[in-house]
Amino acid sequence: MKLQTGKSVSTFFLALVLSGAAFAADLRPADSFATVGDRAERSRALFAEAGKVIQHPRCLNCHPVGERPTQGTDMHPHSPLVVRGADDEGAVGMRCTTCHQDANFDPAGVPGHPLWHVAPKKMAWQQQSLKQICEQVKDPRRNGGKTLSQIQEHMAHDTLVGWAWRPGGTREPAPGTQEQFGALIAAWIETGAACPR
Amino acid sequence: MPISLNVNGQSREVDVDPATPLLWVLREDLGLTGTKYGCGVAQCGACTVHVDGETLRSCAAPVRIVAGRKVTTIEGVSSPAAKAVQKAWVDLDVVQCGYCQSGQIMSATALLEKKPRPTDQDIDQAMAGNICRCATYHRIRAAIHAAAKQLA
């Protein structure tokens, strides 16, 4: 009887932990922010929600400040040592494609995508506040010359961005779905694309 | 499933699962055992081959991706840079146990084919993924510089 009680308690706490984990991995739907009356505040809140994706290690790992990308949920330096190189696709003789192919390759545990590369330095997100990231995302000089509409399209449909939700192996995906993320970015733009303070 | 490959200048056909690692196909189906299995997870570089002139870890690449492309292994590498590397490796007696050296030579050759006069930093960056448990790194770097001088 005691054992059963203990088991019930354990199951309860396990369920609690799992529901917490599931909650942490979710994104609030864009329309749930309609209750925020002030337009600019609503816009900031939407970007903060999208920030759960933007600042997830799955995204930050390939937006390094310096020469080297990181990897893993703990964002340790990429192993083996690799550098962005002149074109953000690796060093001469040690290209991204030396190891990363056009799709995740689970037998070796190596992730992949046809466009695998490191984000340019001017798009660095590591060590940046969400406000700084927001300002970079909006700045055509630092976002690849994109309009806000093109930014939304990129976030919502780019397949390398989408890899963050299909990382393969035991890698933790970014929160929510790319569709939800795209909807948050669209709503953020519709409400004036305000950046967090 | 039959897959056509070009390996060391020869057309070869293998009947394998397209997801089979290239290394398995090279060693088990084509008998090219010069390319070594080290870690199996793209961490050591022992399995390095060239595909269209670029380095590739054959343990971490499905064979389907090299269909129609030129694969070069340690048995077939023969460019001027490769010959310079081979001579420098012998002259400087680089090898100790030798297990990693196929991969080291393939990476060094790929570097010199793209950058005939590499700096120490170029060498470090190109060779960072090739591990040598005998720690012959200092001789590897010296041999790459020696090969570069031959090519000059």
Image (cartoon, coloured by chain):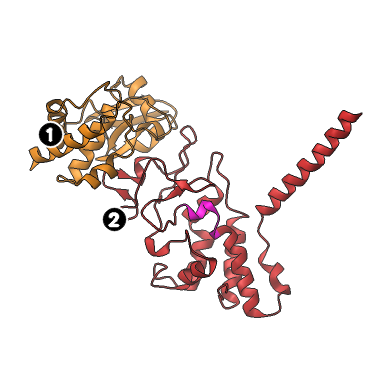
Chain colours: A red, B orange
Is label 2 in a helix, a strand or a loop? loop
* Residue B23 in sight here: yes
In the picture, measured across the screen, residue B21 lies left or right of residue B8, that is right
Tell me the crowding category of disc 1: few under 14, some 14 to 19, or many 20 or more residues within 10 angstroms, Cα based: many
Q: Residue furthest right?
A: A1
| Circle count | 2
Q: Which three-letter amino acid code belongs to the residue tagged 2? A: Ala
Up the image or down, A37 lies above or below B81; here it is: below
Residue B24: x and y, percent?
A: 38, 25
Up the image or down, A129 lies above or below B151; here it is: below
Residue B123's disc is none
Q: Which three-letter amino acid code belongs to the residue tagged 1? A: Ala
Marks 2 and 1 belong to one chain: no
The range drawn in magenta is A54-61
Is label 1 in a helix, a strand or a loop? helix
Q: Residue at x 43, y 70 (%)?
A: A146
Residue B84's disc is 1
Quarter of the image with the C terminus of chain A is: bottom right
Up the image or down, B88 lies above or below A125; here it is: above
Front-most of A80 and A90?
A: A80
Q: CA distance from mark 2 to mark 1?
A: 26 Å
Chain letter for the residue marked with disc 2 in the picture:
A
